Image: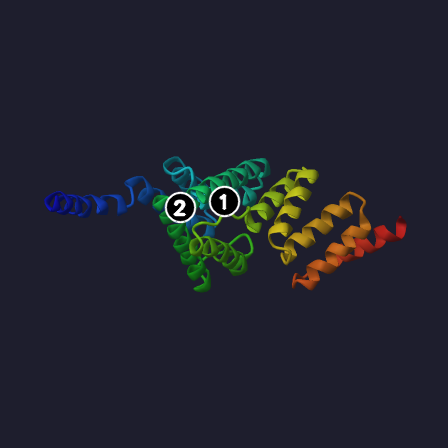
Amino acid sequence: MRTLVVAAAIMFLVVAPAFAQPTREHLDAMRHLRLGQDSLRLEQFDMAESEFQAAIRLEPSLEMAHYGLGQVYMATRRYPAAVHAYLACRDAFVVSNRQRALGDLEAQRALDDQIRAIEEQESALASGTGNVLTGGKFELDRRIADLRALQRNSKSTSGIPAWISFALGSAYFRSDAIVDAEREYLAALQADPKLGEAHNNLAVVYLQTGRYDKAQEEVVAAEKNGFRVNPQLKVDIKHAMGRS
């Protein structure tokens, strides 16, 4: 009996490392993700698009590849395509988050690797290399913080992070889908009530749809949470309220 136990233990020691190693597909997907992020930072949009798409083909559940593709489409004014990319990012997040909550080691590794990739972009930004198109260091910090919270609590099945809903809302807004944009901005604020940008953008939505009192409330909320509201927006809301 003891011989069988020892043999089983030896077999486990031999086999376990194989499961601990990342797959070739994952390594290649992460390489393409990093190249896409670097190209995006340098505003090489065609290259960034190709690299993010390559990462997605290899690993469709890689949230940051879909998110990066959405950033490319926003930067190049292909707003309906950005909507689809951010929807795919949200779907990938839901799937990956469920897998992580179930103890899937590959999903956890993908999360860890994506956090490192975002941190690398933050370091590149700090060194003055290229540009980050959507919020700079603050936006990167928010993504890192949200993903690290998932990293610390692998059993979490929390909702969609604010930065995904906010990005999707902005893509909808640019696509003239105002109702959808409002829904996503509200979802972002439900996830993070202190997200000043979402309050600001919601004020614009309310202004365009004739809800001037609510627009004013959102301007106040945006400024209360540290967002610098464009003075012209405040003037426009004031004039609209005066005419109504």
Q: Position of residue 170 (x, y in %)?
A: 62, 45
Circle on res. 138: none
Q: Which mark is residue 67?
A: 1
Q: Farthest right residue?
A: 243
* Screen quadrant of the N terminus: top left
The crowding category of the residue bearing disc 2, from other C-alpha atoms within 10 Å (few below 14, some 14 to 19, many at least 20), is many
Looking at the picture, how far across and down is residue 203, in whole percent? 73, 51
Q: Judging from the image, what secondary structure is the residue with disc 1 in?
A: helix
Q: Quadrant of residue 222?
A: bottom right
Whether residue 50 is situated above or below residue 241 in the rendered picture: above
Given residues 28 and 2, the one toward you in this image is 2
Residue 33 placement (x, y as % from top left): 40, 46
The Cα atoms of the two marked residues, 1 and 2, are separated by 10 Å
Quadrant of res 180: top right
Residue 146: x and y in percent read 50, 55
Question: Splitting the image into 4 quarters, where does residue 14 fall?
Answer: top left
Can the viewer see residue 230?
Answer: no
- Residue at 49% from the left image edge and 58% from the top image edge: 145
Q: Residue at x 54, y 56 (%)?
A: 139
The residue indicated by pointer 2 is: 33
Compare marks 1 and 2 and give the one earlier in the sequence. 2
Q: What's the amino acid at mark 1?
A: Tyr
Nearest the eye: 42 or 106:
106
Q: State how many labels appear.
A: 2
Left or right of 220: which side holds 94? left
The residue located at (70%, 62%) in the rendering is 223
